[in-house]
Image (cartoon, rainbow, N blue to C red):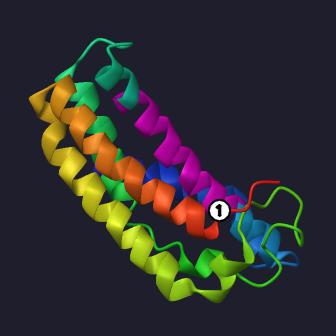
Amino acid sequence: MKTAALTLALLAGLGTAGTAFGQDAAKGAMEARKSVMHIYAYNLGILSGIAKGEAEYDSEVAMAAASNLATASSIDLTYMFPAGSEAGALEGSEAGPAALNDIAGVKEDQMALHEAAAELEAAAGEGPEAIGAALKTVGGACGACHKAYRQKN
């Protein structure tokens, strides 16, 4: 599953690779980081549905989604915040200026997400209640980063 998640992330990034290394590096970087966030969101949606009882618990599905999230959260995002890719400078960007100016903080928050995702991965086979409890930690990690570095348009 980890290979599948990385392949998916890499394929998502391939669509922007030409842009990232061509004329518009800022736009390519924004699209790449959004692709990673979409992978996060998709897998979190599956797990959240299970935890809320909106989707039937299937241990294989839960473990795959948690594994995908843990793998995706290991992708280094720090180089995906070049100058010119912040909100206000690039249409569609939600990266606040702090994200570009505090890459060490972004990396720290990403590590917190990765650790929380690893805990979620361990809990995924234990049922909806365990998933729900672990999702709170993941949500806290996501929220901390978004609060510090995201700028909604």
**Magenta stretch containing residue 39, yes or no?**
yes
Q: Where 73 sits versus 122, above or below? A: below
Is there any visible trace of residue 18 in the rendered image? no
Q: Position of residue 111 (x, y in %)?
A: 35, 71
Depth order, front residue of 145/61: 145
**What quarter of the picture does the C terminus occupy?**
bottom right
- Tell me: 116 left or right of 86: left
**Magenta stretch containing residue 42, yes or no?**
yes
Is there any visible trace of residue 35 in the rendered image? yes
Q: Which residues are magenta?
A: 31-47
- Residue under the image location 70 percent in, 56 percent down: 15
Please tell me whether the stretch drawn in magenta is mainly helix, strand or loop: helix
| Three-letter code for the amino acid on which mark 1 is drawn | Ala
- Residue under the image location 40 percent in, 59 percent down: 141
**What quarter of the picture does the N terminus occupy?**
top left
Q: Position of residue 71 (x, y in %)?
A: 34, 57
Q: Going by the picture, which residue comes out furthest to the left?
A: 126
- The residue carrying pointer 1 sits among few (fewer than 14), some (14 to 19) or many (20 or more) residues within 10 Å by Cα, namely many
- Tell me: 135 left or right of 148: left
Which image quadrant for residue 147? bottom right
Q: Position of residue 48 (x, y in %)?
A: 38, 29
Q: Where 34 sits versus 4, above or below? A: below
- Residue under the image location 75 percent in, 79 percent down: 21
- Tell me: 76 left or right of 122: right
Depth order, front residue of 118/10: 118
Secondary structure found at label 1: helix
Q: Which residue is mark 1?
A: 32
Q: Position of residue 42 (x, y in %)?
A: 50, 36
